[in-house]
Image: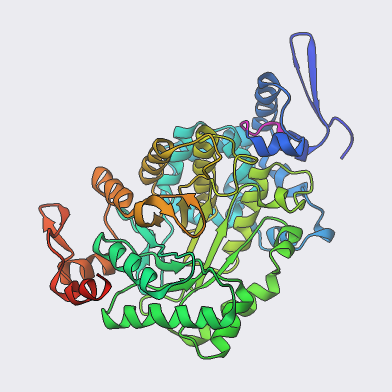
Amino acid sequence: MPSCSFRHTVGSRTYGFRDLKDLMAKATPLRSGDVLAGVAAHSAEERVVAQMVLSALPLRTLLNEALVPYEEDEVSRLILDSHDTAAFAPIRHLTVGDFRDWLLSDAVDSGTLAAMAPGITPEMAAAVSKIMRNQDLILVAKKCRVVTAFRSTIGLAGRMATRLQPNHPTDDTTGIAASLLDGLLYGSGDAVIGINPATDNVGQVVKLVHMMDDIIRHYAIPTQSCVLTHVTNTVQAIERGAPVDLVFQSIGGTEATNRSFGVDLALLAEARSAALSLNRGTVGNNVMYFETGQGSALSANAHHGMDQQTCEARAYAVARAFKPLLVNTVVGFIGPEYLFDGKQIIRAGLEDHFCAKLLGLPMGCDVCYTNHAEADQNDMDVLLTLLGTAGCSFVMGIPGSDDIMLNYQTTSFHDALYARRVLGLRPAPEFEAWLQRMQIFSEAGADFALHAAVPPAFQKAVLQLA
């Protein structure tokens, strides 16, 4: 593309943007990662000008101009080769600004958005998000309905699931069991019981998978387990006969980012096939779990000069190709070098959720921050509430919101209860029925309440852990 392909004059000053990649980056709301990468707008005025130019850009341009060359990047090839031209046809004449207005219109509902998703590229989703207010991101995301299933059904209207995260700094099974029981007694765990292992080897993965499977089978819990280890470890665990439910992997929006994680598209396809071969789902067969996060491409020097939010949106094309049960952005985990404070984390969380849902993904969010970021739990309360309003598929649940293994702050079992109660949201239907059957939850009119005492089925477990 020729130099300064995009220009706009404000008063006596003319702003030039050298190419589409530069325009997209300059139009992005301020975040520390883009400043670190040297791609951010130099002033608020330049940012607004870039947003104005971007809003007038035809959507077709985002399809025709690859931000990373097709020949150099398998994610670019995936995006273009899988693009559904028929689904794109109804909006192909729109500009980015027109697309925003169309998405917000009352004529566009969940069915329309679901049919359109295969025709929307990550770059289109990223572009329109850059010219949207927070309330726009919330309103459109709430209209997107993405439903997946394994042993529980995720993403139904009026529902918000949780990942029960019983991490332990030494993988102590008693400590993990205590956190797991604690979470179940607060109604957490319908999205997945997912452990980040402290010791990342196949033997430990097999041990933890068996432990969770024993608990799930003993109490007949309609949920799924996952050890968040490298995909190759999970494949080896499957080969050793481990009862694996979900395959986990962190992914990024460029081939080089995924290579830094030790994966490519072929490996992810192999892992999905291995998990499907076990046929362990009861109400569905979505077997993949992906995590993403703004800044991962930059931290690997694999961003190709793109802004971090556009890189993040491209990761959703990778996830979409493998029909996952769960995807979540670990939004504040990478640190203040990429998202400096609570305001930037909140904005990024809403962007990620919006873009993923628009592309047809069952998107959740790890509402989190590191202790050296300019953020606190009040910021996370705000983001949790906004995401719950926007129809977020699931959030994390961990004792006291403090992950003692990964050393960051996320959402607690109590936080999930708060969001469900204040927003009128319920767990996944299969899990909700189990909570009532096990006397953990009781119906209270249209609402639900925790039983005051430890339910009979769990009293022995509590005594053993005491």
Tell me the quarter of the picture where residue 386 sits.
top left
User: Considering depth in this image, is 237 or 172 the residue closer to the camera?
Assistant: 172
Residue at coordinates 73% horizontally, 62% vertically from top-left?
A: 260
Decide whether residue 281 is among the magenta residues: no
Tell me the quarter of the picture where residue 335 sits.
top right
Determine if residue 92 is in view. no
Determine if residue 329 is in view. yes
Q: Is residue 304 left or right of residue 235?
A: right
- Number of marks in the image? 0
Residue lying furthest left in this view?
Answer: 445
The boundaries of the magenta stretch are 24-30
The type of colouring in the image is: rainbow
User: Considering depth in this image, is 73 or 308 the residue closer to the camera?
Assistant: 308
Residue lying furthest right in this view?
Answer: 2
Q: Position of residue 59 (x, y in %)?
A: 66, 42
User: Considering depth in this image, is 422 or 105 the residue closer to the camera?
Assistant: 422
Q: Position of residue 329 (x, y in %)?
A: 53, 52
Decide whether residue 28 is among the magenta residues: yes
451 is higher (above) or lower (below) than 373? below
Residue at coordinates 52% horizontally, 57% vertically from top-left?
A: 406
Q: Is residue 263 left or right of residue 374?
A: right
Q: Position of residue 194 (x, y in %)?
A: 44, 67
Residue at coordinates 36% horizontally, 76% vertically from top-left?
A: 283
